[in-house]
Amino acid sequence: MIVLASISSNITHWIAENGVYAVFVLMAVDALLPVGGELVMLFAGVLASGSVVGHHVTLLGASFASGTEGYVVLSLAGTLGYLAGALVGWAVGRSGGRALVERHGHRIHVGPDALLRAEAWFERFGLWAVLLGRIAPVVRSFISIPAGVFRAPLSAYALLSLIGSAVWCFAFAAAGWALGGSWHSFHSSFGYVDIVAVVVVAGGAGLFVFRRVRARARRRDVPSHAGNEGTHPDPSLPS
């Protein structure tokens, strides 16, 4: 449990060590899979405030002052990273279509059921589903690929994703900046979040395995049922 509960500590350590690059990569992944984008941007704000001893915001050899400069740079890194991941997801959905998602989407938790829910979301809100999805917890990580499947126009999709990710990243980074030196006490007080995250991941993994086993069982049953149907006479036919 100690190892599992240290997931967030590992993420924050990586951000502290790699700064802009870590924020960009983690938020790009978060556009496709939920990896804790809230935690990433919160700690990015803490780093920007100068409250992480021995670490500063740097990019390509340039060092940025703690405060506004660091905040803007890290918020932009999160925004652009998320946009990059969102565009990759759109391209995957656009090129592979519904067939690809229905066949392999379960690998990234976008199976047929999730696709149907996303379709209902798009039918209800239209293109605004992209913007709303980007600022909604959990949902935000499952919008990218379906948007490509449903052929959302790239220009509108990119713009709405950019706006939504900017709102999300700048807001959470601002909250982290405000926390500043209080981060450690805040993180300790809300340490149960780590446990919840572990439970969610474990539950998702269990659900994934269950669905795979059930899908394989169904595939095995289909041929046998089809074969049996051919061996029994139709009772409605005259003998």
Image: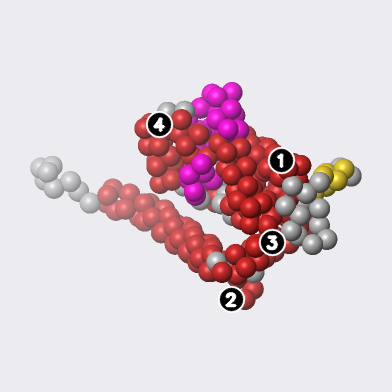
Residue 213 in picture, x, y percent from top left: 45, 61
Mark 3 neighbour class, 10 Å CA radius: few under 14, some 14 to 19, many 20 or more: some
Q: Earlier in the sequence, mark 3 or mark 2?
A: 2
Label whose residue precedes the other's in the sequence (1 or 2): 2
Please provide the residue range marked out in magenta.
135-163
56 lies left or right of 31: right
Q: Residue at x 44, y 57 (%)?
A: 211
Label 2 sits on residue: 1
Considering only order in the chain, which callout, 4 or 1, is on the residue closer to the N terminus? 1
Q: Secondary structure at mark 4?
A: helix
Kind of element beneath mark 1: helix
Badge nearest the viewer, 1 or 2:
1
- Determine whether the residue tagged by mark 3 lies in a helix, strand or loop: helix
Q: Is residue 38 above or below residue 97?
A: below
First of labels 4, 2 by sequence position: 2
Compared to residue 107, the image places residue 89 above or below, namely above
- Name the quadrant containing residue 24: top right
Q: Amino acid at mark 2?
A: Met
State the SS at label 2. loop
Q: Quadrant of the C terminus?
A: top left
